[in-house]
Amino acid sequence: MGLVRTVASKGWATMLRRAPRLGLVSAVLAVATALAPAALAEQAVDWQLGMQPAASPVREAIDSLNSELLVIITLITVFVLGLLLYVIVRFRASVHPVPSQTTHNTVLELLWTTVPILILIVIAIPSFKLLFYVDRTQHADMTLKVTGHQWYWSYEYPDNKDVSFDSTFVETKDLKPGEPRLLTVDNPVVVPVGAKIRILVTGTDVIHSWFVPSMGVQEYAVVGRINESWMEALRPGTYYGQCNQICGLDHPFMPIEIKAVSKENFDKWVANPKMKFAENGDPLPVQVAATSERQAQ
């Protein structure tokens, strides 16, 4: 027993001597993590803290639940850390050489069984509500059908039967200033701001995933099956996503670009799907739009 204590004491002494170096390494890792570029699919900005701002009610609901869970898990972590520190200090060998022989404590066992159950119930109720909320919309204003292929997307607007097109990524050499690499497409999805959009997703070959983080949408494209989701753009702008289901050789080259525009501009686009829009959803001048169209060809 004395030998064990000696080894343990030496181990603690070694850890204490190494603590400054370990702290320095941890600090360096923390800074490197903070400065690392965020996932391109979310089109994050420099020095951003937290997730990308929500652009739809679905994403707002997801962020709200995330914030609630962050509070709960922080309280749990602090509580467990407090217990560990108390045990380390109160029951260390130097002040408590004879360990307790207590094997059962009815009150304690009831507490550590009941309290986690109550916590899980508190988490489950808003989680189930969110799952039902994001599943589908009951009052859709329009429908967007998405079909995944190896390796591009096809879009159809069933409410506007003449509008359908393929959407493929723009190669780096063809990008214009300000266009993000591996996220820009030749034919972006155009949706009206404020409209509840039913999204029907299917596939023709392997499983893909239509994933737009800012909209809170991630739906699998499965052959022979149509999965449903929904979104509602809260403000004009350009929003990006990617296929996040590994689907083969060109999986990294299946970006999603959504242009959210005003209802008036959307009606104009339906009449002329070749119309181009700026980052904020405003229509580009006719000359610029025509030039962009020639470059895409």
Image (cartoon, rainbow, N blue to C red):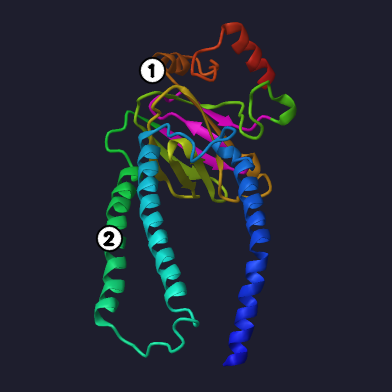
- Up-down relation of residue 151 to residue 104 (above or below): above
Q: Which residue is depicted at the point 45% across and 34% down?
A: 53
Determine which quarter of the picture holds residue 170.
top right
- Up-down relation of residue 143 to residue 9 (above or below): above
Q: Can you tell which mark lies on residue 121?
A: 2
Q: Give the residue at the far front of this rendering.
A: 95
**Residue 77 image offset from top left, x and y in percent:** 42, 60
State the SS at label 1.
helix
Label 2 neighbour load within 10 Å: few <14, some 14-19, many 20+:
few
- Up-down relation of residue 244 to residue 88 (above or below): above
Q: Is residue 2 left or right of residue 233?
A: right
Q: Earlier in the sequence, mark 1 or mark 2?
A: 2
Kindly report which numbered mark, 1 or 2, lies closer to the viewer in this rendering. 2
User: Does the segment drawn in magenta span residue 134?
Assistant: no
Give the CA separation, mark 1 to mark 2.
42 Å
Q: Which residue is depicted at the point 61% across and 29% down?
A: 185
Which stretch is magenta? 144-170
Q: Check disc 2 and give the amino acid type.
A: Ile
User: Does the segment drawn in magenta span residue 154?
Assistant: yes
**Residue 245 image offset from top left, x and y in percent:** 56, 50
Q: Can you tell which mark lies on residue 263?
A: 1
State the SS at label 2.
helix
**Residue 207 image offset from top left, x and y in percent:** 54, 50
Q: Is residue 11 left or right of residue 154?
A: right
Q: Which residue is depicted at the point 68% across and 21% down?
A: 176
Determine which quarter of the picture holds residue 10.
bottom right
Q: Is residue 169 visible?
A: yes
Question: Which quadrant does the C terminus fall into?
Answer: top right
**Residue 90 image offset from top left, x and y in percent:** 42, 75
Q: Check disc 1 and give the amino acid type.
A: Lys
